Amino acid sequence: MVDKRSSYTDLNMPADHLFRASSGTRTPSALQRVPNMDSSSKSLSVSRRSSEELKRDMSSLENTSSPAASSPTASVPPSTRGRLREGRKDALSALAREYGGSKRNALLKWCQKKTEGYQNIDITNFSSSWNDGLAFCAVLHTYLPAHIPYLELSSQDKKQNFTLAFQAAESVGIKSTLDIGEMVYTERPDWQSVMTYVTAIYKYFET
């Protein structure tokens, strides 16, 4: 029988032929280039560092925009802030220093100055000068003209005058401490009650 097994001489191929064959077909190799781990780690480090810097920036912004920093009086010296608080607590003291005399007389002068040029107004006290409601309307008209049609008012219509004045004051948060019914039928209202209400108006608009 003829031995059909290949002889060793058939397997002996030239070395250069083997090299050519391997170069023609590229097979996956365990030695393929691996991504540069150094550059990847560097980019990760930069990303992490950028994230930390962003957190620090956000934290600094939050601190900057805190209520204490954004407060209107944050840059005011403590001594000045103290004077401002004292002025709000006792606004009439500052008014007395401006006009001279007692707090009562200073507030009275302020009312006279505010109502200069208004018809049928003659404020000489905190009682009878306010009994028809026009004095209240005149003072409030200087601040809230849209609420009080002063030129249409009459000293004879006391109830309307008081109603307009008290409603205008309440529209901005000044609560009425006077009773319309009592004011309408009283020629000489209690001066202390009137002064207290006028003081509330002064503090709201002037302090």
Image: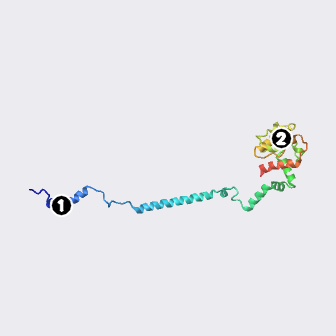
Q: Quadrant of residue 20?
A: bottom left
Query: Helix, strand or loop at disc 2?
Result: helix
Asked if residue 20 shows in the view, the reply is yes
Q: Quadrant of residue 153?
A: top right
Within 10 angstroms of label 1, few (less than 14), some, or many (20 or more) residues?
Answer: few
Q: Amino acid at mark 2?
A: Phe
Q: Are marks 1 and 2 in contact (CB under 8 Å)?
A: no
Residue at horizontal 54 percent and vertical 58 percent from the top: 54
Residue at horizontal 84 percent and vertical 49 percent from the top: 196
Residue 140 % position (x, y): 80, 44
Q: Quadrant of residue 144?
A: top right
Residue at horizontal 56 percent and vertical 59 percent from the top: 57
Q: Amino acid at mark 1?
A: Pro
Using residue 198 as the reference point, say whether residue 54 is left or right of it. left
Depth check: give the residue in front, 66 or 76: 66
Residue 48 % position (x, y): 49, 60
Kindly identify which residue carries mark 2. Answer: 162
Q: Residue furthest right?
A: 187
Asked if residue 120 shows in the view, the reply is no
Rendering colour mode: rainbow
Upstream in sequence: badge 1 or badge 2? 1
Q: How many marks?
A: 2
The relative height of residue 45 versus residue 159 in the rendered view (above or below) is below
Depth check: give the residue in front, 105 or 171: 171
Residue 106 % position (x, y): 85, 52
| CA–CA distance in space, label 1 to label 2 | 123 Å
Query: Helix, strand or loop at disc 1?
Result: loop
Q: Residue furthest bottom?
A: 38
Q: Residue furthest front?
A: 1
Depth check: give the residue in front, 154 or 175: 175
Kindly identify which residue carries mark 1. Answer: 14
